[in-house]
Amino acid sequence: MTSRGLVWKNLFRKKLRTFLTLFAIFVAFLLYGVLMAFQATQEAPTQGPLARRLVVTNKINFTQPLPISYVDKIRALPEVKRASHMSWFGGYYREPQNFLIAFAVDEESFLDVYSEFELPPEQRAAFLKDRQGIVIGKRIADSYGFKVGDHIPLRSNLFFKKDGGDTYEFNVSGIIVSPENLQGEDQVAFHYAYFNEARAFGQDSIGQVIVETNDPAQNDAVAQKIDAMFVNSANETETRSEAVFQAAFAEQAGNIGLIITFVVGAAFVTILLIAGNTMMLAVRERTGEIGVLKTIGFTAQRIFAMVLSESMLFALIGGLLGLAAAAGASAYLGTAGPGFIAGMKVTPGIALSGLGLMLLLGLVTGAVPAWNAMRTDIITAFARK
């Protein structure tokens, strides 16, 4: 029997224990892969339309309003190609659990700025014509079964109407499809004028201005120029790329990087204890066999390498399966999940760092048992048998 054969046999000697240990390692690396892919998506959304546009919000916080007059002032800048505005609605369909990402928008400029949104000409025309028209992202429409021509009520938990109600009535004018910017398929948009006239407070205020410049390479300079226009005013602004704004929005849930670090760290400490205990127990059970191997000529160094290899195999088998599952889950979420994780995937960098963690896990959990096995003398080994 070769050393390789002995390692493989010993690895699956206790099949249930082996399965449970591999499963624990699998779960740890599944979590690692998915969470790191999510973090990478939030921290570096540097490609696509989100990186080309600017978002202007109130400097105090993006939840604070801006005067609608800011839109025309920004549009007047020579560096600005077009601009639109959006206001958060805080809406839901029938029941609070049916929450929707809903915005009141300047309808025509909204569709121009978000040119990646695919809307048939007849649906676009219907939306622009109907004051109570609404366009709905495809994934929301599919989820609720909305169709063009439907009449739907949306309720707001923020903006009550002048008549005391909280329900706004809309006609579905179109369904948004957006392969390039999946966030568009997760939101709804309706006429700001209808919303502004009906709400009980906050008239002529908006939430944010979306800006498309003539040259995206100059976005940083344009952002500084916009903020300089309103410095020392009652409503100072903060301008940043839409990608950075989306990442900041996600951070409202907490420090994502720190949360992920704690979750992954806790998982790996747990797995370290489980795998380390498994290896210690496995070697202790085979003390007599180690004595036999040394008796027939196996060197201490060879036994050390065999035990360490067994630990490495544990980590690599469970870890590679976990990363593979994470890659599949991330790819699915990146295409079928919410728009803010569009493009989520396990990158080569994440895979390489995961491989490094597997090797480190195998080394740490196998070093002590391998060392003990190497130092065990023949007499002691047979005495313990």
Image (cartoon, rainbow, N blue to C red):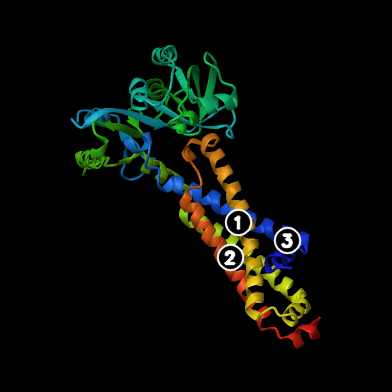
Q: Mark 1: which amino acid?
A: Gly
Q: Single out the residue that lies furthest toward the bottom.
A: 379
Q: Mark 2: which amino acid?
A: Leu
Does residue 384 sit above or below 258 in this rendering?
below
Q: In terms of depth relative to the viewer, which is nearer, 86 or 183?
A: 183
Q: In terms of depth relative to the viewer, which is nearer, 206 or 307?
A: 307
Does residue 5 sit above or below 199 in this rendering?
below
Q: Position of residue 110 (x, y in %)?
A: 36, 25
Q: Which mark is residue 293?
A: none
Q: Position of residue 331 (x, y in %)?
A: 54, 40
Where is mark 1, residue-wise?
319
Task: Describe the element under mark 3 as helix, strand or loop.
Answer: helix
Where is mark 2, residue-wise?
361
Labels 2 and 1: the sequence-earlier one? 1
158 sits left or right of 317 in the view? left
Q: CA distance from mark 2 to mark 3?
A: 16 Å
